[in-house]
Image: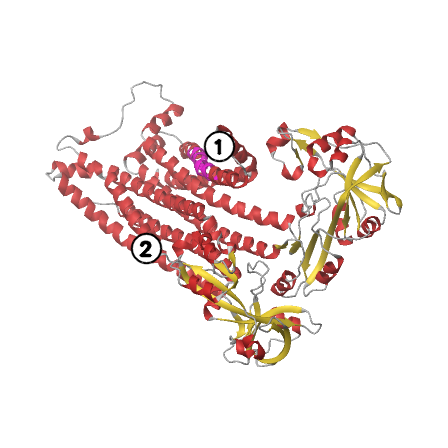
Amino acid sequence: MKISKYQNRILAIVIFFVFFFGLITVIYSDSYQNTLEEQRKKLYGSWNIASYHTSDDEIQILEKNATIDKVGKVEVLGDILDREGENIGAIGSADNSFFSLGNIKTLSGHMPRNANEIAIEASYLTRLGYSYELGQNIHLNILFYDKEGNEQIGVYQFVLTGVIKNYSSYWKTQNNELPSFFITKRKSIGTNKNGTITKHIFISLKEKYKEEADALQVLCQRGEFVKNDYVYGEYSGGKLFILERNMLQFFILGIGCITIFLLLYIDLKNQTENLLIMRILGATKAQIFQIYIKKKKEVMLFPGIAGIFFGVALPSVLVTIINKYGNYQLYLRLSWINILGLIVLFTLVILFVFFISIIRLLKLPLRGKLQHQTEYKIVKRRRKLNKKNLFKILNIFQRKEKILSVMLVTVLSAFMLLTVYQTWEAYRSYRFSCINYPDDYTFGRLMGHIGSENTMTEEQLSLIKGLYGVGKVGSVAISSNIKLMFSGKIDDIYLKKVKEGMRDDFTQKQQLDNYTYGPLVGVSDNLTGSYLKQVESSSKKKLKNNEVILYVPDYIKTEKGMLQVDLDLDSSTQKNGENIQERMIKEGDTVTINTKKGKKILNIVGVIHCFKDEMPASLNPMVTYGVLCNESTYRSICGKFSPCYVTVGVQKETIPYQTDIELSKVNTSLYFENNRVEREEQLNNLILKVIMTFVLTVIGLLFLLLIRLGIGLSIEKQKIRRYQTLYQLGMEKIVIWKYFLKNNFTESFFGVLLGNIALVFYRYVTERKNLIEFADYSIRKSLSFYMEICKRCVAFTHWEFLILVVIILILLNFFIAAACDYQKVYGKIK
């Protein structure tokens, strides 16, 4: 039997790439998840639960529990005092398991080994005025308690043996103190050997028990139980991540199976005459079957083995190169269970497709003339032959190839749309954080806090401004509602509807009377420029004393009677809701406020109805009739400036993690948030998504090219003769090529549209998950629940980007197919 070498080469290449790209996808997805996990563990520690201020008895109980994998213990022996006598950190000792669970490393040197040695967090060395030079003497004032609970202060000298990378500011401690100064034994602090010692225990659970960490809380009766939520991102989104990974594997396998089936189908169709001759000469079906399988086994076996080898080896080499020469750290994970499972699955499915493809060998007749073995259907309806319906007649003989081509484009489009859209979402999330939360650190939250009880004192604000690495500090204070008297007219309808829709912002008395009430919003001078930019036709850069900006937001009244501002709106709300606007108050009017010293007249230099896109959402006070003024004006009216929201930036050429430490130690009633670290995590996630999308897109395009070359085999022999005949009868090649172009565009268009099904399914799963987490639905299987999911899918899908990607995919598929067809028409038709 004569087998086409060209077809065999294509089949061998496809088998190689199926295993190669399949394994790369699995290893890369596992490594992507592993990299995110290791980044979190490196920053927040790899422990799952902790018991702060625990006892020896409780430690023994926890150590004997069958669910526990590793236990790290730490003892806090005392507090370090600076030259002014202020407490700056704790000193203690810990075992090796604690350093291992916490991923605590030294930037230089080693952990203490002898009684007079010490290792210190880098930021604390700088704070005490010491350099990072190892071997220098460190003098510390240590405050500790004796066994009667009396304070004692001693001066101790240690030799610096290690500089530790900062860790304590990132860990979840619930305001419990962790050591930043490590020594070997408690006897290193002389009189404290009989004193009070605080003990903490950190626990890593066995893999199968990690999701049940909360159940161990009953064992922590003495200590304070804390669950390390920071590392549980790997479990909270695990099911969705596994779903995405399985979809990628399915697409790889689907593309490969379609390719193999197509190549074998075409090969058998081209071999029909040879096979029939063998049957006529006396060969049995079993003999033909064995001969064909033997030939194909040689073609498929070695490329499959090579694909497995390079699919495992190449990711290892690439990760090693990136880690050695790049600035980004990747963590390779070779999960042999996943790898072997994929190899077995791919092998079984490919064998199944192989036997399904060659089953037609058993249908060859025992006898008969060759011309009677054709499978072409006879067109019953007679048509007048012309150029237009001539191609329609030829299409009848290529329906299977057209269906396979559309299936190919569908699978590839679904695969690429899913990965590209997920990368776009990661970019949007990172960009949203950069625009709306641009500051490195924040204290408190601003939106809607009228007369908030949680504020920061001016002393605490001054302390923050003087810390290491702190750059620009902005602050906003919001008073309770006060009566506002405007010199011009106001919109009474707007006032009435606002009081009805925003009842929680007004007292009962304020709701009933006809006066206007609003809070005074004091803004530090370095932030007033941001608000002035939101005022149309304003050239001012700063607010002077007694100058104010009035914030009267445009509202949309929803069907449920709620008022929403521009930040909360979706397209359906904007279309169906009632617009509520205030346009009577103008720039140049004045507003009068009664103070203890008398009436205060303020000049309105601008009115804000809607914040523009470039305005950070974190600076939107979200308070109706908010009177924005500078810090001096606010203090003259309210008596003091106590901010409820503070933004902090980091100076350039400073050590950021040292600033993390300094700010985390400031005790205020405001919630402290490290936006810098969150942005870094989002950026790392985005980089990984971009790399993965690039790799998988290249995979898809290579497969597309290979399969198009396989489809090109379908016009060989008898099929090429049709178009050869048309050319010889006088039809120009450009006309034949235009016919191919039309078919290619139709196949690309419908294939890409069908590929959007995978994206629709992904969006449905995502929005359903979000709706269950953030909304309260008593009946989750009700019609309104599914309708709400559909509305969210429509409202929150980035249609402009999606349409652009769809157009690009259609054109890519079209041009690749057109290039292959150009070679067919101008290379084979002569």
Looking at the image, residue 300 sits to the left or right of residue 243; the answer is left
- Asked whether 622 or 311 is in front, the reply is 622
Name the main secondary structure of what is drawn in magenta: helix
- Asked whether 571 or 498 is in front, the reply is 498
Q: Is mark 2 on a helix, strand or loop?
A: helix
One can see residue 340 in this view: yes
Q: Is mark 1 on a helix, strand or loop?
A: loop
Name the disc covering residue 308, or none.
2
Alpha carbon separation for disc pair 1 and 2: 48 Å
Residue 560 position in % (x across, y down): 62, 29
> Which residue has dot 1 on it?
779
Q: Residue drawn 43% across and 54% down? A: 210
Q: What residue type is labelled 2?
A: Ile
Q: Which of marks 1 and 2 is in front?
A: 1
Name the disc covering residue 801, or none.
none
Which picture quadrant has residue 152?
Answer: bottom right
Disc 2 crowd rating (10 Å Cα; few below 14, some 14-19, many 20+) is: many
Any magenta on residue 760? yes
Q: Which of marks 1 and 2 is nearer the N terminus?
A: 2
Any magenta on residue 282? no
Residue 389 position in % (x across, y down): 38, 23
Residues rendered magenta in the picture: 747-762
Q: In this view, does 196 lie above or below 21?
A: below
One can see residue 398 in this view: no
Numbered circles on residues, count: 2
Q: Residue drawn 47% across and 49% down? A: 236
Q: Which amino acid does label 1 sit on?
A: Ile
